[in-house]
């Protein structure tokens, strides 16, 4: 009897492994329902199978069943505490659950169990940045640089995500190489271009916007006014959403103002591609790129004849399946277009970034005391996410605080560990922790109202404030920036140029510090800046949402005309 039971058990294990492999294939194809069925069958046949438990847990989380998914991930690690894949998946679940400290612990455990597990190395960078764990992050960057020196991209680029590199002090060549590697992976095994849709009916181009962020999200705060402003006599607009619906005013507005709103979150990859192709979209716009939650694999399968990288990913995707990128002459200087961008550039007049002219600001400005700020003294602020804050710019901020008595730096607190890490870093610079004040999250109108309490917004360097720059400018707060060489590091300069404040673009780190210190000592100069901003806010292109949409429409027509002439995508200037 014992021998028969052993045979049956081994047979069930074999079947469970087969089901697990099938579940992984279905998961990779985006067929989550079928993947869940296969993986549940695997766990019934072999309840202690850590790999199947872990994979099923991740599939359930992607399906929105977080509680059961997380329980399965924890169970997988209990069954096999050294299972690197299960530890990595649990780390990813912690990232999605906004628990970066636990994410770091599990991902480091995955690397300890399997030092060659590239996924864990790549996943670890983000949470280290989120908690401002700079010593550990510095070691990871040195590892990447050393590996890149002796290995081809197919080795070292597997350990990074292109988006994370935008905020790290790495050579631009590595950012480009990582983008190319990930694009090549997405395009591998994909068949040739699909048949082009029929010519525009009744002279209407069919435009598709694709994103997971049609909800209360920073990108949507910028573009919420886009969809309803299109000229419907010339454009038929569809918003394709593969993210969660949160019932927010942003989601409701996009659903109401788009001509078509299509939720593709439950569709497999192939089903989503087929749906877009079946809709006959002429121009498909990726509003995510390689950012978290993006689905560039949709674009790799070419559901539309023209595909554009716009707004969400501030860099070239280095992908042969992306035809254009929307930029301006500040974020993408003409000399950079050929060398650093695989896409042809549509240069916008003014800023490439759309902004919402109707964004509400609470009428009541809170008191300083209510926000934990001192009653007197200069208030510098930076409401960027923690991952953009790094040692080089932080050292500038600390030198500025030391030179300006009674000043404070007002920061956004996205997690408690980052707050304590920054307090300790300040003390190492000889600055008392009380001079770093942390703000919690608020609804957007209240956040914009409290921003009025700040005197000057200090931008980050490698990855600028984007939405947060326009938040500050909309609230009437001047922004000081020190641009770098990349798209992500030049956005604030673009926005300041468009709003008529180019004198707040510092040419160097030293100039940035001197200007921040001088403005605290010269209240009349600061008042003049604020007055100019108050006038320019509604008289310059930056917050002219309607004009931006007209520029976008003009760009679409130029792109389509280029294609109908049988020409390859080419860079061009959009006429104002």
Image (tube, helix red, strand yellow):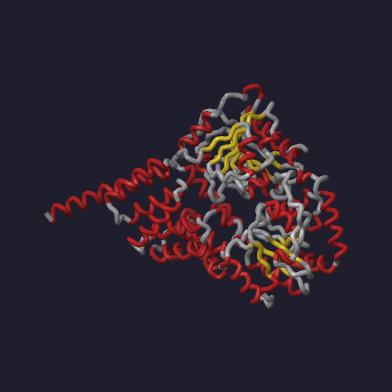
Q: Quadrant of the C terminus?
A: top right
Q: Is residue 52 left or right of residue 172?
A: left
Tell me residue 39's x, y (percent): 34, 47
Q: Which residue is rendered at x = 42% and y = 45% of the image?
A: 28
Can residue 507 be seen from the camera position used here? no
Tell me residue 30's x, y (percent): 44, 42
Can residue 539 be seen from the camera position used here? yes
Count of picture labels: 0
Q: Which residue is rendered at x = 21% and y = 52% of the image?
A: 10
Q: Which of 371 and 451 lies nearest the eye of the viewer?
A: 371
Q: Which of 107 and 174 lies nearest the eye of the viewer?
A: 107
Q: Is residue 33 left or right of residue 184?
A: left
Q: Residue furthest left?
A: 1
Q: Which residue is rendered at x = 63% and y = 65% of the image?
A: 390
Tell me residue 401's x, y (percent): 74, 71
Residue 484: name its quadrant: bottom right
Q: Is residue 315 above or below residue 460?
A: above
Q: Is residue 423 above or below residue 454?
A: below
Q: Which residue is rendered at x = 63% and y = 68% of the image?
A: 391
Q: Quadrant of the N terminus?
A: bottom left
């Amino acid at each position: 009897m014992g021998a028969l039971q052993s045979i049956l058990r081994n047979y069930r294990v074999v079947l469970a492994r087969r089901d697990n492999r099938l579940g992984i294939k279905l998961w990779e194809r985006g067929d989550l329902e079928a993947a869940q069925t296969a993986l549940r069958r695997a766990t019934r046949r072999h309840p202690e199978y850590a790999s199947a438990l872990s994979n099923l847990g991740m599939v359930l989380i992607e399906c929105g069943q977080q509680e059961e998914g997380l329980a399965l991930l924890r169970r997988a690690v209990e069954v096999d505490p050294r299972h690197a894949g299960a530890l990595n998946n649990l780390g990813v679940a912690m990232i999605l659950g906004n628990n970066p400290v636990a994410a770091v612990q599990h991902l480091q455990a995955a690397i300890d169990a399997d030092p060659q597990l590239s996924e864990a190395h790549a996943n670890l960078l983000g949470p280290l940045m989120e908690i401002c764990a700079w010593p550990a992050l510095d070691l990871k960057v040195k590892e990447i640089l050393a590996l890149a020196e002796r290995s081809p991209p197919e080795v070292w680029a597997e350990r990074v995500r292109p988006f994370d590199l935008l905020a790290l002090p790495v050579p631009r060549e590595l950012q480009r190489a990582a983008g190319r590697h990930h694009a090549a992976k997405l395009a591998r095994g994909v068949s040739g271009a699909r048949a082009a849709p029929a010519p525009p009916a009744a002279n209407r181009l069919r435009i598709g916007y694709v994103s997971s962020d049609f909800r209360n999200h920073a990108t949507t705060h910028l573009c919420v006014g886009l969809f309803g402003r299109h000229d419907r006599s010339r454009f038929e607009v569809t918003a394709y959403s593969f993210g969660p619906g949160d019932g927010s005013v942003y989601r409701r507005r996009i659903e109401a103002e788009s001509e078509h709103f299509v939720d593709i979150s439950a569709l497999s990859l192939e089903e989503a591609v087929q749906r877009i192709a079946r809709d006959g979209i002429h121009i498909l716009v990726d509003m995510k790129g390689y950012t978290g939650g993006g689905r560039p694999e949709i674009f790799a399968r070419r559901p539309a004849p023209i595909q554009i990288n716009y707004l969400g990913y501030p860099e070239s995707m280095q992908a042969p399946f992306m035809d254009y990128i929307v930029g301006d002459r500040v974020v993408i200087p003409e000399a950079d277009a050929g060398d650093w961008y695989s896409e042809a550039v549509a240069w916008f007049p003014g800023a490439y970034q759309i902004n919402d002219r109707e964004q509400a600001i609470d009428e009541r400005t809170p008191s300083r005391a209510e926000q934990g700020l001192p009653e007197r003294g200069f208030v510098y602020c930076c409401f960027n996410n923690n991952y953009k804050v790094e040692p080089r710019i932080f050292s500038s901020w600390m030198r500025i605080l030391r030179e300006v008595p009674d000043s404070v730096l007002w920061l956004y607190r996205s997690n408690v560990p980052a707050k304590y890490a920054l307090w300790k870093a300040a003390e190492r610079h000889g600055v008392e922790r009380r001079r770093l004040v942390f703000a919690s999250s608020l609804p957007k109108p209240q956040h914009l109202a409290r921003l009025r309490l700040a005197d000057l917004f200090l931008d980050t360097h490698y990855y600028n404030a984007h939405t947060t720059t326009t938040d500050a400018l909309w609230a009437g707060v001047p922004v000081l920036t020190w641009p770098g060489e990349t798209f992500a590091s030049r956005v604030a300069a673009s926005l300041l140029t468009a709003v008529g404040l180019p004198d707040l673009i510092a040419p160097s780190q030293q100039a940035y510090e001197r200007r921040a210190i001088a403005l605290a000592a010269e209240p009349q100069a600061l008042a003049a800046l604020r007055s100019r901003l108050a006038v320019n806010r509604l008289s310059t292109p930056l917050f002219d949402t309607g004009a931006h949409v007209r520029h976008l429409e003009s760009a679409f027509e130029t792109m389509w005309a280029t294609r109908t002439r049988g020409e390859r995508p080419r860079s061009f200037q959009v006429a104002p």
